[in-house]
Image: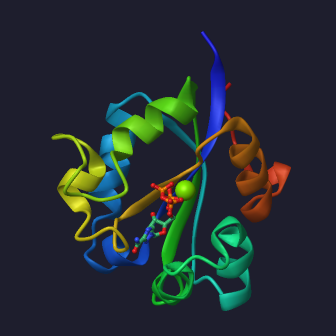
């Protein structure tokens, strides 16, 4: 068992459709434990910093516009092999390529408006968790 933490966002499209609960249910049913969560509306600066790795790409500006278009839920997920397992649960970036039963197959509408984010490596997870949460906001189970 490798207990890991990963960082997750329910993006503005899914929050706007009242799909927070449905997505949380899928996370918990998959054995991922929510150990921190909050709702916020990203500022342009927060979104730009979060997605800095994509600066200069053609989809960067519309991505920032999308991510600041409405509230998001940000959460820390904990579980065995959580980083890879949550990426698998999300499915591919483009929902048309996402496997049946994945979150993006069921909740995403396009490659941009794709419902959820998940960290893609241990390094990203550590950076992204620290970007949004202080240590005292994370509540692991006893
Ligand atoms: P994420 O970072 O949000 O978990 O998504 P990902 O790893 O599957 O995809 P990534 O390549 O990191 O892209 C970040 C987000 O940018 C938007 N995007 N739009 N061609 C496009 O229009 C395009 N490509 C990516 C998506 O919202 C994607 O999740
Ligand atoms: Mg990514």
Residue at horizontal 24 percent and vertical 58 percent from the top: 95
Task: Quadrant for residue 111, please give it.
Answer: bottom left
Task: Quadrant for residue 60, please give it.
Answer: bottom right
Residue at horizontal 21 percent and vertical 41 percent from the top: 99
Which image quarter holds the N terminus? top right
Q: Which residue appears farthest toward the right when viewing the image? A: 135
The answer to whether 114 is drawn above or below residue 101 in the figure is below
119 displayed left or right of 112: right
Which image quarter holds the C terminus? top right
Q: Residue 130, image x and y in percent?
A: 80, 55
Residue at horizontal 49 percent and vertical 79 percent from the top: 59
Q: Which residue appears farthest toward the top when viewing the image? A: 1
Residue at horizontal 23 percent and vertical 50 percent from the top: 97
Q: Residue 74, image x and y in percent?
A: 57, 62
Q: Nearer the viewer, residue 29 or 118?
A: 118
Can I make out residue 93 in this image? yes
The answer to whether 101 is drawn above or below residue 137 in the figure is above
Task: Quadrant for residue 101, please give it.
Answer: top left
Q: Residue 23, image x and y in percent?
A: 32, 53
The answer to whether 101 is drawn above or below residue 112 in the figure is above
Q: Nearer the viewer, residue 8 or 91?
A: 91
Q: Residue 106, image x and y in percent?
A: 18, 54
22 displayed left or right of 7: left
Can I make out residue 141 in this image? no
């Amino acid at each position: 068992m490798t207990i890991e933490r990963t960082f997750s966002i329910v993006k503005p499209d899914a929050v706007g459709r009242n799909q927070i609960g449905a997505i949380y249910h899928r996370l918990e049913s998959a054995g991922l434990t929510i150990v921190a969560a909050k709702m916020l509306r990203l500022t342009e600066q927060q979104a730009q910093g979060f997605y800095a790795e994509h600066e200069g790409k053609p989809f960067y500006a519309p991505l920032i516009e999308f991510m600041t278009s409405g509230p998001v839920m940000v959460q820390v997920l904990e579980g065995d092999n959580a980083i890879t397992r949550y990426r698998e649960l999300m499915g591919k970036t483009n929902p048309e390529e996402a496997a049946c039963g994945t979150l993006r197959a069921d909740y995403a509408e396009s490659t941009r408006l794709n419902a959820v984010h998940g960290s893609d490596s241990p390094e990203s997870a550590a950076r992204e968790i620290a970007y949004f949460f202080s240590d005292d906001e994370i509540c692991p189970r006893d």
